[in-house]
């Protein structure tokens, strides 16, 4: 009888702890909505057009998955994958690609980052933050230089 009571008590303890562990096993995060991603891409494209630049703009979610890609009609064929790579790099490293460019020059401790697959270390990729969380990133390619790409992305 005593053994049976101990067994029942043990089962109750285990079952009582399952919801707590299940709750600990889930996470909540903020993510960029599609409409906001599209608005950001349109704004960056408009800023570059105002300056006479033909560019591509990519917006990715916080995990680097592409949400939006816009390409001006005369932007080069290399600009869409470059813009996407810049956005992905900014999202996954949680820093601007212009800043990464300076940190990864030859001879710098982080120079090896340039050799990783899909990493594009050219100015023009920036994180998009809301409420203290990274919710996505934007990448611009096609303006004359990384600084100009980044200015459009801002």
Image (cartoon, rainbow, N blue to C red):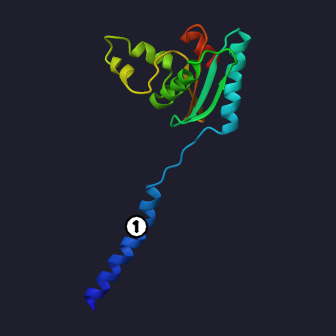
- Of residues 95 and 152, which is closer to you in this image? 152
> Is residue 154 visible in the rendered structure shown here?
no
In this picture, residue 25 sits left or right of residue 150: left
Quadrant location, the N terminus:
bottom left
Q: Residue at x 70, y 36 (%)?
A: 35
Q: Residue at x 44, y 15 (%)?
A: 101
Q: Residue furthest left?
A: 3
Quadrant location, the C terminus:
top right
In this picture, residue 58 sits left or right of residue 19: right
Name the residue carrying label 1: 17
Q: Residue at x 59, y 18 (%)?
A: 77
Q: Residue furthest bottom?
A: 1
> Is residue 10 visible in the rendered structure shown here?
yes
In this picture, residue 43 sits left or right of residue 101: right
In this picture, residue 46 sits left or right of residue 5: right
Q: Give the x, y percent position of residue 48.
A: 68, 14
Q: Give the x, y percent position of residue 104.
A: 38, 16
Q: Give the x, y percent position of residue 144.
A: 59, 7
- Of residues 131 and 68, which is closer to you in this image? 68
Residue 39, picture quadrant:
top right
- Of residues 115 and 100, which is closer to you in this image? 115
């Amino acid at each position: 009888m005593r053994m049976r009571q101990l067994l029942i008590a043990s089962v109750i303890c285990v079952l009582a702890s399952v919801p707590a562990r299940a709750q600990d096993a889930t996470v909540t995060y903020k993510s960029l909505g599609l409409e906001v991603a599209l608005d950001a891409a349109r704004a960056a494209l408009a800023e570059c057009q105002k300056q006479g630049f033909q560019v591509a703009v990519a917006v990715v979610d916080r995990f680097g998955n592409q949400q939006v890609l816009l390409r001006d009609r005369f932007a080069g064929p290399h600009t869409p994958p470059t813009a996407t790579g810049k956005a992905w790099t900014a999202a996954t490293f949680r820093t601007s690609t212009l800043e990464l460019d300076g940190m990864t020059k030859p001879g710098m401790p982080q120079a090896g980052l340039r050799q990783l697959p899909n990493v594009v270390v050219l100015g023009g990729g920036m994180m998009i933050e809301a409420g203290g969380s990274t919710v996505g990133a934007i990448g611009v390619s096609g303006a004359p230089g990384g600084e100009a790409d980044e200015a459009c992305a801002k």
